[in-house]
Image (cartoon, rainbow, N blue to C red):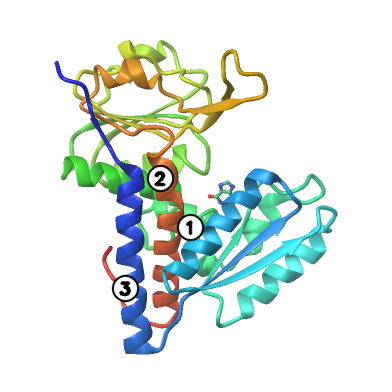
Amino acid sequence: MTDATIIDGKGFAANLRERVGAAVADVTKTHGLVPGLAVVLVGEDPASQVYVRNKRKQTVEAGMQSFEHSLPADTGEADLLALVDKLNRDGTVHGILVQLPLPDQIDADKVIAAIDPDKDVDGFHVINAGRLATGGQGLVPCTPLGCLMMLKDRLGDLSGLDAVVVGRSNIVGKPMAALLLGESCTVTVAHSRTRDLPAVCRRADILIAAVGRPEMIRGDWVKPGAAVIDVGINRVPKEGEEGKYRLVGDVCFAEAQAVAGAITPVPGGVGPMTIACLLRNTLTAACRQAGIEPPAL
Ligand code: GUN
């Protein structure tokens, strides 16, 4: 059997960003609407700073306005809630993203609950989780949305396929399962208590790995020809190189590639799709707030 096709998430994301940019130019020209995204960062976590910088760059490149709020690490919950309230009422802000994780003194659930659900471009608000679970029109979390777009691009109609989602987080696993169910897949959500996880994974036509455990999913857990989507981004020490790291997914890529039909690499797979989908969500949110039909992207 030949090796799996590698799903080029980086290229797919660049293409999606371009399509979002063209659609932004169109709504700006036709309706005078300039979508605006506010990103709030509390503290100086280096990984978060990198994400926020990339978000700003890509937002501006897509022709949207970027509003950045960097607050000190010792910001109190009330101050952050006051900022969210201000952004909720600001008509030039169509999307609000509060970068996670937040410092210990701030209850992240409370902050997410304070964001206007129609501006919640992360799709983390319980209203959006509820809309997704019940098939309503909301905003969908960016990472699972990116995974679904790549799967549909690769496989076309997903109906009737067996999908196994490994991981049950609110940010990836649960919304991913809801999206796949919405596409009429037969969905299994597996997790740390699942019995005989390798056997469960081997049933999957679509295998989504979102557990945060480096290379946990082995080649012999993969059904021949399956589509494997690796959401994991894990830093592991480089052997023989003190202080250096390499990025690996939740799937042992070298093993799985020999069995799967298609697979996303790490890096360059799911990761780049997350910000591209954030831009898409911001455009969707802006159009809905302006009473315009959002473009199909
Ligand atoms: N931290 C890492 N990824 C994300 C994300 O997608 N959204 C938010 N709000 N914080 C994050």
Q: Residue at x 40, y 45 (%)?
A: 144
Q: Secondary structure at mark 1?
A: helix
Amino acid type of the residue that numbered disc 3 sits on in the rendered structure: Ala
Q: Position of residue 217 (x, y in %)?
A: 41, 18
Q: Is mark 2 within 8 Å of ligand 1?
A: no
Q: Position of residue 38 (x, y in %)?
A: 59, 68
Can residue 117 be seen here? The reply is yes
Inter-mark Cα distance, 3 to 2: 22 Å
Amino acid type of the residue that numbered disc 2 sits on in the rendered structure: Pro
Q: Check disc 2 and report the residue beneath it.
A: 144
Badge 2 vs badge 1, beta-carbon distance below 8 Å: no
Mark toward the start of the polypeptide (1 vs 3): 3
Q: Check disc 3 and report the residue beneath it.
A: 23
**Could you classify mark 2 by the number of other residues whose Cα lies within 10 Å: few (under 14), some (14-19), or many (20 or more)?**
many
Mark toward the start of the polypeptide (3 vs 2): 3
Mark toward the start of the polypeptide (2 vs 1): 1
Q: Is residue 251 above or below residue 170?
A: above
Q: Position of residue 214 (x, y in %)?
A: 51, 22
Instruction: Kindly give the residue lying farthest to the front in the view shown.
Output: 241
Q: Check disc 1 and report the residue beneath it.
A: 128
State which quarter of the image contains the C terminus. bottom left
Q: Is residue 141 above or below residue 222?
A: below
Q: Is mark 1 within 8 Å of ligand 1?
A: no
Residue 39 tag number: none
In front of the other: label 3 or label 2?
3
Q: Residue at x 56, y 76 (%)?
A: 93
Can residue 125 be seen here? The reply is no
Inter-mark Cα distance, 2 to 1: 14 Å
Q: Residue at x 29, y 71 (%)?
A: 295
Q: Is residue 56 above or below residue 170?
A: below
Q: Secondary structure at mark 3?
A: helix
